[in-house]
Amino acid sequence: MINSMLRQPQDAAIAEGSEDLAPVMRKVAFRLMPILVAGQIFAYMDRVNVGFAALTANKDLGLSPAQYGFGASLLFISYFLCEYPSNLALHRVGARIWISRILVTWGLVSACMAFVVGPNSFYLLRFLLGAAEAGFFPGVLLYLTYWFPTEYRARYISIFQIGIPLASVIGSPLSAALLGLDQIFGLKGWQWLYIVEATPPLILGVAGFFLLTDRPALAKWLSPAERDQVQRRLDQEMERAAYVSKHGVGLGLLADRRVLFFAALYFTMAAPSVALSLWMPQIIRGFSGASLVTIGVLSAIPFAAGVVAMPLWSIVSDRRRERRWCSALPSFLTAAVLAACLLTQSAWIQMILITVAGTGIYAMKGPVLSFITEGLPGSVGPGGLAIVSALGNLSGIVAPYAIGWIRSETGSFQLGLLFLAGVSLIGGILPLLAPRQVDAVSVS
């Protein structure tokens, strides 16, 4: 699937008289994307594996649903606080060094999650994990704009974002299996889960230092002609960019309406994704009563649907050179099927509905993120993307805590899904109401 995306011709760009960059873009992608995708897989796995650990750890640690939801969301508070300075640091010191540093730091903190002993230590380490991981996603998003021109961007962003559903496709059965390692060397299964899944980022951090390259001009693995070809196209896009924020690149961007609009859009995109990732095992156990192994398999299914939907819908968005409707339609689909979960008590029908929701949740990511990167070019890119991601990732505080609170107060996960349906409905409306100025340099 990924290979077919890399080979997809860019007919619209060629029709405009542009050079065909497809061959060199494939070369760039095969060099950079494997380590970035692997990093995204384990970033998300280490962020949400707390959902599987909770199946047994919550009892051992004495965590209520509300305490678990609060602790799970603390990651996003520190993420919010550290994301902006982290992205500016990446822009200044270079992606190779900074992304490698992030990978190693969060791997170490994630491994320490194995040694929490109660609510307070759980809260502390989730907070530290967010600080350690902060900057990886917006940093890579910014990094991709250094390499991939607009007409190629949605597909390569979606390739990177495939790491999110793949994290659950791989991590759900793996986490369920690791929970079965109870009392080996005196450790609980959930402790092994944290230790084993924290190891790959440490390896990737070392590999990234040697494999990543900051910008095309420094890529010795490209020929001089290829370096010039890529840089020339990117420079042409910068010259055509219609928008340079009057607020510059500092925290004044918080007053910029484009930044705020894209932050709201990002919030509605991220909320259903992170909430379901953190609560999926417990939701499935709630309506099915299945064993840990079965929960692991069932939890992977909605995310597997997302793995298929994300690249296919991103190709549609790139080929049509359209972001608004390609962002809105998957959000409307997600809202409809999550709301429909209230209408049935059948475990299998609910499983089907959640799987369809997974399709919509992940299909929207490529178009939405391309919409954002294309709407914040030039001098606002590093700071603007960081602020959008930081504000948008506050959904990771609101959504998991809301699900936990609703579950504690009503005993119902379906009402929590209704809350996510409302967020997705807003997420479908926002792109259609966006002022034309926000996509002045977009492909739509």
Image: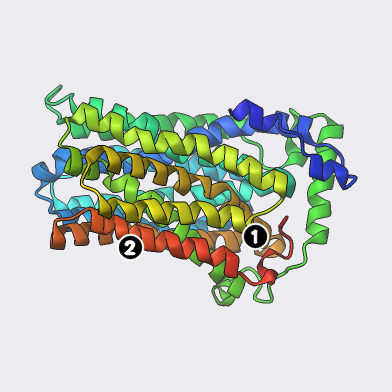
Q: Quadrant of residue 257?
A: bottom right
Residue plotted at (54% across, 36% down): 36
Residue plotted at (87% across, 44% down): 15
Residue plotted at (87% across, 33% down): 225
- Does residue 306 lie above or below 407 as drawn? above
Q: Quadrant of residue 243?
A: bottom right
Residue 49 seen from this side: no
Q: Residue 161's x, y, as percent?
A: 52, 42
Q: Residues within 10 Å of mark 1 (few under 14, many from 20)?
A: many
Q: Along the polypeptide, which appears first: circle 2 or circle 1?
A: 1
Question: Viewed as shown, does residue 161 lie left or right of 78?
Answer: right
* Front one among 326 and 389: 326
Q: Residues within 10 Å of mark 2 (few under 14, many from 20)?
A: some
Q: Residue 438's x, y, as percent?
A: 66, 67
Quadrant for the C terminus, please. bottom right
* Front one among 287 and 292: 287
Judging from the image, what secondary structure is the residue with disc 2 in?
A: helix
* Mark toward the viewer: 2 or 1: 2
Residue at the spot of label 1: 381
- Does residue 155 lie above or below 373 as drawn? above
Identity, as a three-letter code, of the amino acid under mark 2: Val
Question: Viewed as shown, does residue 340 lie left or right of 379?
Answer: left
- Does residue 249 lie above or below 143 as drawn? below
Residue at the spot of label 2: 398
Q: Quadrant of residue 292?
A: top left
Question: Viewed as shown, does residue 264 lie left or right of 72?
Answer: right
Identity, as a three-letter code, of the amino acid under mark 1: Gly
* Front one among 237 and 444: 444
Give the number of callouts: 2
- The answer to whether marks 2 and 1 mark residues whose Cβ atoms lie closer than 8 Å is no
Q: Residue 177's x, y, as percent?
A: 24, 25
Residue 168 seen from this side: yes
